[in-house]
Image: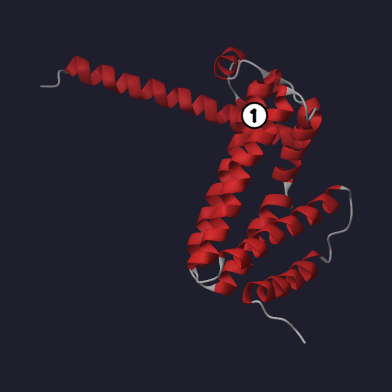
């Protein structure tokens, strides 16, 4: 039999856990927003706490160092991108056209926005430092499974693993390249044209069509 005291203690425990998680989520969200605006060198942990609406002590309890804070923020970014990938793959099903279209959409989402700039900025702070090494490890941990999931989706749709891998790897390499060009200030007015052109090339690679 559950006593009222036990029930009260359990409720308090859940409430405390919920509050703790809520504080953690606020700090991570604030860190992501500030990293996008100020980058790593301009980020101040005191400003994160203020932006999140939590005490500095509460923030330090969850993230004792600046690097711990930004790594948790980056992991959150990668997790969100991975979840979006899973949803796109689910929507595409085994439809080849949808698979290609949503693969391109996934590449654009990963490399054309502030999330990519955030990750690149952290990696370039000092690539050989503990932070740089951890950032590269996170990138491999999350980006490699994304590519593998897309390859598996094309294989399940009936295409060979070799063709699927060619299309997936080259699509992300193309999107990454255009993402870099955007970062250096090149106009992206024609990006829809170029991505549409790549879509046709990807379809030919997938179907092994050779024009003679």
Q: Quadrant of residue 172?
A: bottom right
> What residue appears at the point 54 percent right and 66 percent down from the top-left corner?
154
Q: Quadrant of the C terminus?
A: bottom right
Answer above or below: position of 63 versus 197. Answer: above
| Image x and y of residue 207, in percent | 63, 77
As drawn, is 16 to the left or to the right of 90? Answer: left
| Image x and y of residue 121, in percent | 78, 36
As drawn, is 39 to the left or to the right of 18? Answer: right
Q: Quadrant of the N terminus?
A: top left
Circle 1 residue: 71
| Image x and y of residue 35, in percent | 72, 33
- Around disc 1, counting alpha carbons within 10 Å, would you say few (fewer than 14), some (14 to 19), or many (20 or more)? many
> What residue appears at the point 55 percent right and 19 percent down from the top-left corner?
62
- Whether residue 102 is visible to the viewer of this picture, yes or no, is no
Report the residue that reaches farthest toward the left: 1
Report the residue that reaches farthest toward the top: 57
Answer above or below: position of 207 versus 87. Answer: below
């Amino acid at each position: 039999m559950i006593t009222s005291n036990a029930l009260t203690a359990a409720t308090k425990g859940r409430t405390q856990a919920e509050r703790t998680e809520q504080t953690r989520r606020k700090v991570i969200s604030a860190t992501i927003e500030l990293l996008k605006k100020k980058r790593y060198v301009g980020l101040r942990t005191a400003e994160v706490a203020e932006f999140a609406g939590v005490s500095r002590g509460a923030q330090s309890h969850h993230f004792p160092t600046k690097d711990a804070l930004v790594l948790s923020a980056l992991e959150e970014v990668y997790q969100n991108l991975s979840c979006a990938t899973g949803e796109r793959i689910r929507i595409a099903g085994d439809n080849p056209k949808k698979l290609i279209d949503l693969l391109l959409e996934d590449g654009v989402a990963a490399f054309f926005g502030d999330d990519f700039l955030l990750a690149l900025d952290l990696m370039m702070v000092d690539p050989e430092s503990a932070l740089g090494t951890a950032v590269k490890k996170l990138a491999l941990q999350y980006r490699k499974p994304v590519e593998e999931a897309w390859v598996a989706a094309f294989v399940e749709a009936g295409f060979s693993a070799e063709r699927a891998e060619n299309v997936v790897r080259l699509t992300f390499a193309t999107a990454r390249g255009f993402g870099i060009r955007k970062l250096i200030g090149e106009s992206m007015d024609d990006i829809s044209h170029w991505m549409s052109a790549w879509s046709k090339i990807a379809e030919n690679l997938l179907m092994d069509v050779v024009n003679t």
